[in-house]
Amino acid sequence: MKWFDGYLESISTLAAQQITANSQTLNDTISSVSGGADQVVVLVNDNSTGNDKIIARSGINSIADLKGKKVAAEEGTVDHFLLLLGLEKAGLSSQDIQFVPLETGKASAAFVGEQVDAVGVFAPFTTQSLKRPGSKELFSSKEFPGAIPDHLVVTRKFLNEQPEQVQALVDSWFATLDYIAANSESAIAIMAKRAGVSVPEYKEYAEGTHIFSIEENLKAFLPGKDRTSLAFAANEMSEFLTKVGLAQQKPDINNLFDDRFIKAYAAKAKK
């Protein structure tokens, strides 16, 4: 197991095949695939339902107020994507703001230090960013349900050569969820320590993340006509990322998802 303080580093490390699996968002996976990486989504961890936020200084009360302002986020990653979604919804584009590309921790620090007017961050950096006097949440992933799903993503080489290890990873994820359910307080203490926040702060994040059950995983891999379907969401994100220039070209997503490991775990769980 390897912990990355900088999320973007974990994405680039998987793309370079220096690790064999990573927990990352769908849009970041699509960006990697469009750049030539050969990756496969084998599990849905969760959906962000508020833990990704665009936070603004005092005086900025709407998305329209961001026009001409300095906004920091980690370029090409989840909160940059959320920022662009919000701008598009308000009839603005990336050209309407002064985008400042910074690693998430540095983006948060720049906002608290009053070097930028707004910032796009994920928890626990949301807590840090909101310590700036007068700052407030402008909008979050809660307003864009299904837009930021997190997955276990593996390289196709690893999947082809060691499918039993991929299955072990999927099984371990659900074993971890079982542990958390049975040992809630101690599990939260462990996770809060790793995140560098207090237990009460960590508990606040619970509402901002929806962990997927086995049943929700099985459903997500099916075809559908909204973002509850991974195939639908991936196609929508591919078009969006290509349009705004975060993806080099529209990737082939036909082989992006493999549900056999979820199905195998579900069959074992029934027994």
Image: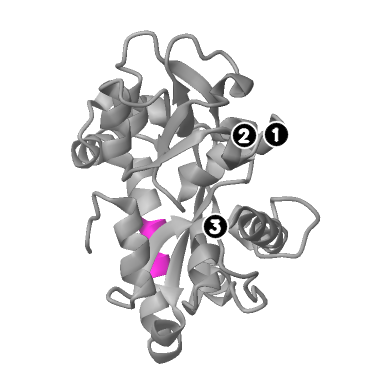
Disc 1 element: helix
* Callout 3 crowding tier (Cα within 10 Å): few <14, some 14–19, many ≥20: many
| Label 2 Cα crowd, 10 Å radius (few <14 / some 14-19 / many 20+) | many
- Identify the residue position indicated by label 3 in the image: 246
Indicate whether 256 appears above or below 75.
Answer: below
Q: What residue did someone put label 2 on?
A: 86
Question: What distance separates the C-alpha of mark 1 from that of mark 3?
Answer: 18 Å
Q: Amino acid at mark 3?
A: Leu
Quarter of the figure with the N terminus: bottom left
- Percent x, y for residue 268? 50, 70
Q: Which residue is mark 1?
A: 89
- What residue appears at the point 28 percent right and 22 percent down from the top-left corner? 112
Q: Magenta segment, which residues? A: 169-175
5 displayed left or right of 43: left
**Image quadrant of residue 124?**
top left
Identity of the residue furthest to the right in this view? 225
Who's the residue at 55% across and 65% down the image?
30
| SS at circle 2 | helix
Q: Is residue 21 above or below residue 85?
A: below
How far apart are the alpha carbons under marks 1 and 2? 5 Å
Identify the main secondary structure in magenta: helix
Disc 1 to disc 2: CB gap under 8 Å: yes
Mark 1, Cα crowd under 10 Å, few <14 / some 14-19 / many 20+, is: few
What residue type is disc 1 on? Lys
Q: Is residue 234 magenta?
A: no
